Amino acid sequence: MSPFRKPPSLDDFKRLPRYKLLPKIKLMVEKEDPPQALLLLNQIISTSESADELLKALSILMHHLRYSPSEIPREKLKELNVFVLTHIPASGDAGDHPDRLYLAQIYRSLEGIGQIAEHKLFTKRVQAALREKWPRIFEWLSFLLDIISQPGSVCDFGGIQRLGPAVMDALTLPGRIVDVICTFPNGIPWVVGWWIRIGESDIFNVELIDKWQDVVFRLVEHSPTSFTDAINAIDLKFASLVMQALFTCSQSAAHFTKFHLPLEYLIILAYYSPKFRVAFLSLDSIHWVSVLFQRVVSSVPQMHRSQNLLTMYRCLDAVFQYLIETFRVRGHTAVIEALKTRLFWSMIHSIPWLFGHGIRDPRLETLRQHYSGLLDVIGCHAIYHSVLKVLAVSVRKMEGQEYERYIEQVPSGSDAHRRWYGLKRDVEEFMQLREDWKQDPIQSQTCPGCIESDESDHCLRYRCSQCLQMYYCSKRCQKKDWKNHRAFCKKLYDVRASGAIPPLDALDQSFKDFLIDRVIRRSFDKATKLEESYRVANPSYPSNQLLVHALQLESVPIRHNVITFKEAQAFVTPEQWDNRLVTVTGPKDQWYLVTYRERGQKMLKLTCSRPKITGDSSRREPAQNDTRPGLEANSRLPVVVEGGSCA
């Protein structure tokens, strides 16, 4: 018999001494009124002030999980009705519904375990206990979720569907048992499978997807390799569903508080799966993400009024991360596509509320960093002729839209202020150098259709739209050369269609090499002053040892730093150091390390205005008066050596 004449309440238990609470609950769980007792136990867990109490409560909760679902007879499994899990009887009468009450006990037990995992008094002892119990917890969680996913099941999806992500969210919090979950057989694939399944069911289900995505982000951070394997096993049909959701958002059919859901599916799948990345690109993901960026920026006043700033931050953070990663992986072609979709318009209009006066939200800091990173990765591709032309057009449009009134709303000297004006200055400088490049006789090219020299800016103004490699002076010449060009064109088109990054065309390659050379030469005067300042600030650095001028073309504006020879060598392996060394004509004993990005990879070129050093000795810092045999005399700038990936 129960010591209470009616089902006890939390108030009844509060009248008992604290040390008697859990024994009473344990007795009720084992013999008398399990569902009601577990419900009360969960209420007690939330008010617990002792880690020992949490351990005792966990032991009680595991009572009904002590048997594996596989030990339940198959016939009995077919009769289980999950509906009762969200409609637990108030009484302890188990005579009419033994199966229902048993499942209710499982449900409440898992619910209580989730409460323990997220409790503020979580300790190493509680963590160790959960590590030990995890296999059985996983068995029952997957069992319950499998029941509701069976075709024709009669159940309330809400209760079970909320239980799964809620428990997993608690168990993967920092300091819990995410490491055990990641190494558990089928742990990551099971989580990924349900994350995808919920998205297939309703990709705008904020309540469920937000929880699953939090779990997914933690698993990715802890075990990226295993997560990648699980992602690659997903059917590519899901890519179309994600893109359809982005299209829906861009057309205003979805509320802006839900925009982040398909975007976060997009960035995770694209980042960890090359096949999904290519699938998204083939479905115009860059275009629709850029359009969605415009929609979010246009919704800023509405979001401010509705207190949905956190949702807006998540949405824009996903936009920035996707574009940054896509630009880094796909290179100049992706940058051009985004710039043609009014990307700069969105970035300019978002400046006031991202960087403006009076906005002091710590959550903005990460968003600002990603914004700056996006501007950097766009600017670093300005060394390519095809990007520079589109970039120059975008800058001119910015000027026509009075972009200064947006930038001037942020403090002078701020990061946004410096980067935007730095980008504008770099583009203007590169456009001036472009005029020199066009006059350089070395850049002369011939039209395959007419075999005429490229003596003007307008000679080779037509590019094949399929291969994006061959240039012609007219459409007539392109048609004339088609017989010779067809095989080459089809081969390159197939390469692009397969998702491979297209190579630089002849003009992009030529302009890049020319620009790097001119950037180095223009820095000669500044280099001397910077080197003198470095030696004054670092008097202990030996005066007979060389310094290296690092020119970072992948930053906005271009950075020029002075570093030691050893610091420069740390950029590359010994083999790359030997292979990337060329000489330029300039002040004696000035060395330059130029870093830039090409086709998604960080590249470098090492140049010096002294003889090239050969052999193993190139890994040592050269002496001032090195006259060893095998050293070439100072020469004019040789053919630019293609950069290799930075170590």
Image (cartoon, helix red, strand yellow):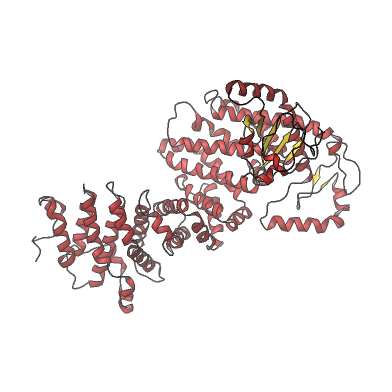
Image: 543 above or below 1: above
* Identity of the residue drawn at 62% across and 27% down: 421
User: Outermost residue toward the right?
Assistant: 451
Image: 116 above or below 312: below
* Identity of the residue drawn at 23% across and 65% down: 63
Image: 561 above or below 99: above
Quarter of the C terminus within the rendering: top right
* Identity of the residue drawn at 79% across and 31% down: 435
Side of 254 where 79 appears, left or right: left
Q: Specify whether residue 577 is in view.
A: yes
Side of 647 where 230 appears, left or right: left
* Identity of the residue drawn at 66% across and 30% down: 549
Q: Residue 407 sits in which quadrant?
A: top right
Q: Specify whether residue 400 is in view.
A: no
Q: Position of residue 147 (x, y in %)?
A: 37, 68
Q: Residue 571 sits in which quadrant?
A: top right
Q: Residue 574 sits in which quadrant?
A: top right
Image: 360 above or below 600: above
Which sits in the foreground, 416 or 57? 57
Quarter of the N terminus within the rendering: bottom left
Side of 645 where 364 appears, left or right: left
Looking at the rendered structure, the number of numbered marks drawn on it comes to 0
Q: Position of residue 166 (x, y in %)?
A: 35, 55
Q: Position of residue 420 (x, y in %)?
A: 60, 30
User: Outermost residue toward the bottom?
Assistant: 75
Q: Position of residue 618 (x, y in %)?
A: 70, 39
Side of 506 where 183 appears, left or right: left
Which sits in the foreground, 474 or 188? 188
